[in-house]
Amino acid sequence: DEAGPGAAEGDAAEAVVTGETLNGKQDETMCDNLPASQPDFSGSWILARIDGDMDAFLKDIGTGYVMRSLASSMNYGVGKMTNDVVQSGDWIQIVSWSPKGTFTNEFHLDGTEQATVDPMEGRPMIATPRWEDDGAAMYVESRRPDTGQ
């Protein structure tokens, strides 16, 4: 998710989420050794840590107080939220499990707007997924269709 309107680089709204494979290898370590080509994210992942002020980030993107409090009480899903990923070229399917339920999203990493579901809240989202210019990372900008946040 992108920071909300008016958020500048360095604001608390830039929470960083790090995952690791279920066998314990962190994605950062795995990505450091990849060539400058499109990585394959296929596998099972678990949310390992969150850096930054997640409450401020969630507030910035329009998440209400009750949901933020619930997320905080569950440590924002760290050690609980999982993603099973299947990828083939520019197509990726992500099956996410969180205490809110299981959600499946499919994307084409082509820079077009696509309907998705927020795996934390189960609400509709609009995502624009694409590869970074060097092809070494995936970038997904998302917003709520009802508020634009």
Image: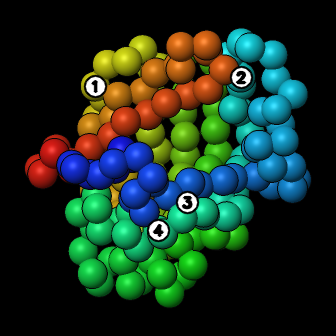
- What residue do we see at 50% from left, 87% from top? 73
Q: Which mark is residue 113?
A: 1
In terms of sequence position, does the residue under pointer 2 or pointer 4 come before the other?
Answer: 2
Distance Cα–Cα, label 3 vs label 4: 19 Å
Disc 3 crowd, CA 10 A, few/some/many (<14, 14-19, 20+): some
Where disc 1 sits, the SS reads: loop
Percent across and percent down for residue 22 are: 80, 55
Dividing the picture into quarters, in which one does residue 81 lie? bottom right
Look at mark 4 in the image and give the residue it sits on: 54
In terms of sequence position, does the residue under pointer 3 or pointer 2 come before the other?
Answer: 2
Percent across and percent down for residue 109 are: 47, 20
Distance Cα–Cα, label 1 vs label 2: 22 Å
Percent across and percent down for residue 37 are: 71, 12
Look at mark 2 in the image and give the residue it sits on: 39
Dots 2 and 4: beta carbons under 8 Å?
A: no
Where disc 2 sits, the SS reads: loop
Distance Cα–Cα, label 2 vs label 4: 27 Å
- What residue do we see at 46% from left, 68% from top? 54
Residue 17 sits above or below residue 71 on the image: above
Foreground tag (3 vs 1): 1
**Closer to the camera, 44 or 19?**
19
Determine if residue 82 is in view. no
Dividing the picture into quarters, in which one does residue 61 lie? bottom left
Q: Which mark is residue 97?
A: 3
**Closer to the camera, 102 or 118?**
118
